[in-house]
Image (cartoon, grey):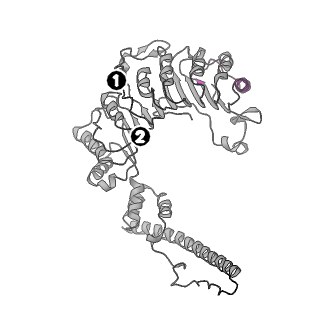
Amino acid sequence: MQHVVQQADAVHQQINSITALLEQFNARRAGLLREASRRDSEFLHPQSKPCTLVSESPQNPWSRSGLPIARLPTEVLDLVISCLNRNDLARVASSHKTLYPIASRIMYNNITINVSLQSMRCMKTLIKHPHLASLVRLFTIQWPSLSTPTRNLHQLAQDTLHALTAITSLSVDVGNDFPPWNLQNCTFTLSSLNTSFRFEQILVQFLESQPCITELTLRGFNSDPSQFSFSATTFNLNPRDITASLTLKPTALPLLSKVSAIHAGPNIMGTIIKGRPVKSVVMPLYADCSSKSLDAIASSSSPIERLNIMSFDPNAANYLLTEIAKRFKDLEALAIVLLLAECSEQALEAAASSLSNFSRLRYITFMSASPRARISDNVEKRIAKSWHAHCPTLKTIILPMGNVLYFENSTFESLSDIPALLLPVQYRYLTPRIPDYFSYGYMLY
C-alpha cells in the first residue's frame, strides 16, 4: 500500500511541476496580451486611461500556486501517464478520480490475450464491464499452439469479442485446426483484420459485414499442407483447392487497400482483390500458378504501388521481373525473394532491361536465398547503375548480398561503406536485412 501511495505522489508531483510551468507561461502570455492591448489603446485613444496590469497574488487564478489536477489539460495528463507501464497505470487509475478515465483509456486501448490466467481474468472483466470494453481499440488473441481449446475457453473468447463494440483492429493467431468463432453478431467495425483462420464461408460472411476494412492479412493454410506437391526443387499448392468455389459479394470490402496472404493462391487473391482499390500486396508465388497469381493481383481497381513477392519457382529468375513489369508499371516499391532460385551476376544484369517499363519505381529488393557465388560490392554497384540507367526513378536498391545501395549525388553508395553519422538523414536508420517471410504479416517497405 505504501508503494502505491508513493507512486501516486510521484505522478502528482510531476503533474504539479508541469502545472507550474503552464501557469507561468499563461501568466506571461496574459501580461503580454494586456500590454499589447494597452499600447494599441493609447495609440488609438491618447487621452484614455491605460489599463492596469493584474498583479500576481495568491488570489490571482494565474498565480504559481498549485492548480487542481482537474484543471490540467487532458493532453498533458495523457502525455505524462502514457509513459507508464500497465502495473503503474493500474495504480494511477486508482489514485485520483480525474486520472481514472485517462489511465483506463490508455491501459485498455491495446489488449493482447494469451492462455495465461491473467488473460482469462481480463476477458471476464471486459465482459462484465461494458464501459471498459468500449475503451479497447486493438485486440489480439495469441493462441498459436492451442488447436483444441476447452469449450469454456472458446465460449469466453467469443463472448469477449461480442462485448468489444469499438475495436478497429483485430488480430487472431490460432492453430490451423482451431474451430473458428461465429463473428456475425459482433458489433465492432474494423479497419484492420489479421487472422489465421481458413478462408472459408464463415470468414467470407464476416468480411462481407465489415465495409471499413482497409488492411487484410490472411495467414491460414487454405490447401491441405499434407497434399502439397513437393519435389527436389519446388512445391506447389494442392490442386484440389477447397476455396475455389468461394466468392465475395461485389459490394464487400469497398475500402480495401492492403492485402497480405502468407499461403494463398490465385483463387483466394482473385476473390479478394478483384474490383477493389488494393494498392499494396504481399503474397507467395508457386511454380504452377505464378502467372495466375500475378493476374489476380492485377485485377485491382487501383494501380498497385507496393508489391512483395516470395517465389517458390526455381525458374523465377528468368521471367518474374519481366512479368511484373508488364502488369504493374506504377509500382513505387517492389520486393522479390527467390527462395528456390539462384541470382547470378548474369541474371541480374539481364534483368536491367525489364526495369524500363516502370515509371515510378523508387525502391527495389531482388534477393535470393541461395546465391550461387558471392557478388562483390563493386559488381553490385555496377549492376545498380545499370538498373538506374533503365529506371531513373530508382533511389534504393537491395541486391542478393543484402547491401543497401542508395542513389546520392549521381552515384550509388553502399550504407556499409559510410559511417552512420555521415549518411543523409533519410538513410541513417536504414539497415539491410533479409525478411523472415515465414513470420506473420511480413513487409519490406
What label does residue 296 carry, if any?
A: none
| Label 2, label 1: how far apart the Cα atoms are | 21 Å
The answer to whether residue 299 is magenta is no
Q: Is residue 281 visible?
A: yes
Q: Is residue 117 above or below residue 297?
A: below
Numbered mark located on residue 212 in the image: 2
Give percent across and percent down for residue 158: 27, 41
Residue name at image x 31 percent, y 28 percent? 201
Q: Nearer the viewer, residue 275 or 179?
A: 275
| Residue 418 on image: x %, y % | 73, 38
Residue corresponding to mark 1: 246
**Labels in figure, total:** 2
- The kind of residue tagged 2 is Cys
Q: Is residue 147 above or below residue 422?
A: above
Dot 2 or dot 1: first in sequence order is: 2
Q: Identify the residue at image location x=30%, y=42%.
A: 186
Q: Residue 404, can we see it? A: no
Residue at image location 29% in from the left, 38% down from the top: 184
Q: Tell me where residue 390 appears, x and y as whole percent.
A: 70, 23
As drawn, the residue found furthest toward the top would be 231
Relative placement, left or right, of 107 versus 128 is right
- The magenta stretch spans which residues? 367-390
**Magenta stretch: includes residue 370:** yes
Label 2 close to label 1 by CB (< 8 Å): no
